[in-house]
Image (cartoon, rainbow, N blue to C red):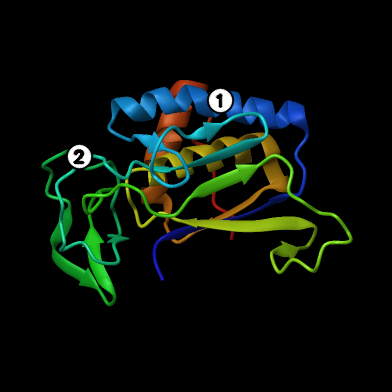
Amino acid sequence: MGYTHYWKKPYEIEFKTYKIIVDDFKKIVIELETIGVKLAGWDGKGDPDINYDDVRFNGLENCGHLKNDEITIPWPSEDAGGVAGYLDNIKEGDKHWFAGTLLSKRCCDGNCSYETFQFTRKEPSDPSDPPDPLKSDSKYTSCCKTAFRPYDLAVNCFLIIAKHHLKEHLIVKSDGNSPQWFDGKLICQTKLDYGFDFKLDS
């Protein structure tokens, strides 16, 4: 249980297309840092892996944000968006959803890392391998539970970029709706001249 994004992708993406996706994302990473979204390696430490074979990152574990034990099983409120500053009021008033805390902005509880985001150019698909429960309709199915932490915005941006270049070959679904994806669309549109046309798949 937790706020999650889901996608189905080809088992292998042409190198040329994947390189364009990665190069576009690298342009976005610089912008994300200026608004307080710091990316780290898969475990919340070190540098993110952003190369032409694999993109793998998480939020920064030792992010410097204040510890907040009141944030339990976070979920964005209906119109939630943006990224909370260091001392922003991040809770949506005193509202809660049935399992935890409603948030008005992306924020953390003092640790910006959560679940690793990974989007690989080529997934293993050796026919001799045991059946893979993630294989469906010739697509590799994956997801990332971000808990609406700041790096959620980086996940949004990457999936918007990948969808732009892979088109119908990438299916993107989410626990969020248009308001939660607006920031990513705006950043991509501003920096890459596309993004506003992005739509979640039904």
Where does the image place residue 13, in percent across and percent down from the top left?
Answer: 75, 39
Q: Which residue is drawn at the image coordinates 73% and 48% (left, top)?
A: 123
Q: Can residue 118 be seen at all in this image of the molecule?
A: yes
Q: Which residue is drawn at the image coordinates 52% and 29% (left, top)?
A: 25
Q: Quadrant of the C terminus?
A: bottom right
Where does the image place residue 3, in percent across and percent down from the top left?
Answer: 40, 61
The image shows residue 178, relative to residue 190, as above or below, that is below
Q: Can residue 193 be seen at all in this image of the molecule?
A: no
The image shows residue 72, relative to residue 157, as above or below, that is below
Which of 128 and 173 lies nearest the eye of the viewer?
128
Which of 162 and 29 lies nearest the eye of the viewer?
29
Total residue callouts: 2
The numbered dot on residue 24 is: 1
Residue type highlighted by circle 1: Asp
Q: Which residue is drawn at the image coordinates 42% and 56% (left, top)?
A: 177
Residue 148 appears left or right of 69: right
Report which quarter residue 83 is drawn in. Answer: top left
Where does the image place residue 168, in percent across and percent down from the top left?
Answer: 71, 46
Residue 124 appears left or right of 156: right
Give the SS element for disc 2. loop
Residue type highlighted by circle 2: Gly
